[in-house]
Amino acid sequence: MDGHLRLLREIAASTVTISAEIPASHPSAAVLGTSRSGTGAVVDAAGTILTVNYIVLGAKRVQVTDTADNTYPARLVAQDFTTGIAALSIESGHLAPLPCASSNSVNAGEDVFLLASVGGAERRSACGFVVSTDAFDAYWEYSLERAIWISTINPGLGGAPLCDPGGHMIGVVSLNLGAIGRATLAIPAEHFFEHADELRRYGRRVSRPSRAWLGMFCYALPDRTVVAGLVPGAPGDTSGLVVGDIIVRVDEEQVTGRLQLYEAIWRHKPGDKIELKVFRGGRIEKLQITGGDADEFFAI
């Protein structure tokens, strides 16, 4: 028990509470708000902090607080809209980094734990196990081919480090799902570590082919995908999509599932013309939308 508590204290000392301020004019403010809080973990001696992108998306001012209640200014280093990872930086030497490892060595049934901020200097931990590493898709044009589904609920703010029994960070806690047996979802940490040099240099993954983005939120229903919301000013919003549309075809390809819809859109690049057929008001409507670039749109 003493060893376990010592390990938790060591990991807690490498975590921070993130406080981000976002201008009301930023496209994400209407959905995510202008004042956001989250958890971050220092992952190298240079002071890089790993977290989830939605916490710092559009932030003009970010500060972090450690477990000794010290506060430091932080700057945004990189954002990856495809995986949902973001990296901040503080001056080196303030906090010791967490040891890190690939999640590829973790299998269903293995023990894990997370340690999250609940604000300021306070932290809470939760222990559980990996339920699966199945794929995941979400309502905001997002998917992971391999996600870490864990049994325990995150007791604090998003962005917490997910660790193996030895205290190595293997993931970034993203969402509380509330599903039976699948309480929380984490993003594999190698999405940052395997591309860290590129992300630090360019602030994004420039080597990965860009893909079209429409700026829509989608409900996945049996055999259909319904538009549940639209980002104001995004391509979908400005091209005639409306809430309640059922998307039935993309470029004459029939689509029924949400991931199938996303993949059909992602075969296009930003700037490509994408033809959608939607069921609306009892009839089929045809729309032509020019695909956008999420990185550029949210960089406004």
Image (cartoon, rainbow, N blue to C red):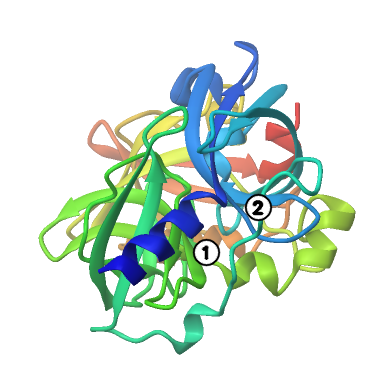
Please indicate whether residue 107 sits to the left or right of residue 294 in the image: left
The mark that comes first in sequence, 1 or 2, is 2
Label 1 element class: helix
Q: Position of residue 170 (x, y in %)?
A: 49, 71
| Residue situated in front as seen by the camera: 76 or 127 | 127
Q: Which residue is mark 2?
A: 212
Name the residue at the front extreme: 2
Q: In the current view of this chain or complex, which residue is farthest to the right?
A: 201
Residue at figure coordinates x 56%, y 33% from the top left: 18
The percent coordinates of residue 58 (x first, y second) are: 66, 28
Q: Is residue 253 above or below residue 216?
A: below
Q: Give the residue drawn at x 42%, y 29%.
A: 119
User: What type is the residue that disc 2 sits on?
Assistant: Ala
Q: CA gap, disc 1 to disc 2? A: 10 Å
Q: Which one is in front, 232 or 82?
A: 82
- Image coordinates of residue 293 in percent, x first then y, are 71, 45
Residue 195 occupies which quadrant of the picture?
A: bottom right
The image quarter containing residue 134 is bottom left
Name the residue: 62% across, 19% down. 22
Q: Residue at x 61, y 32 (%)?
A: 64
Circle 1/circle 2 CB separation < 8 Å: no
Q: Is residue 173 above or below residue 118?
A: below
Amino acid residing under circle 1: Ala
Q: Quadrant of the C terminus?
A: top right
Image disc number at residue 264: 1
Residue 157 pos. (x, y %): 39, 39
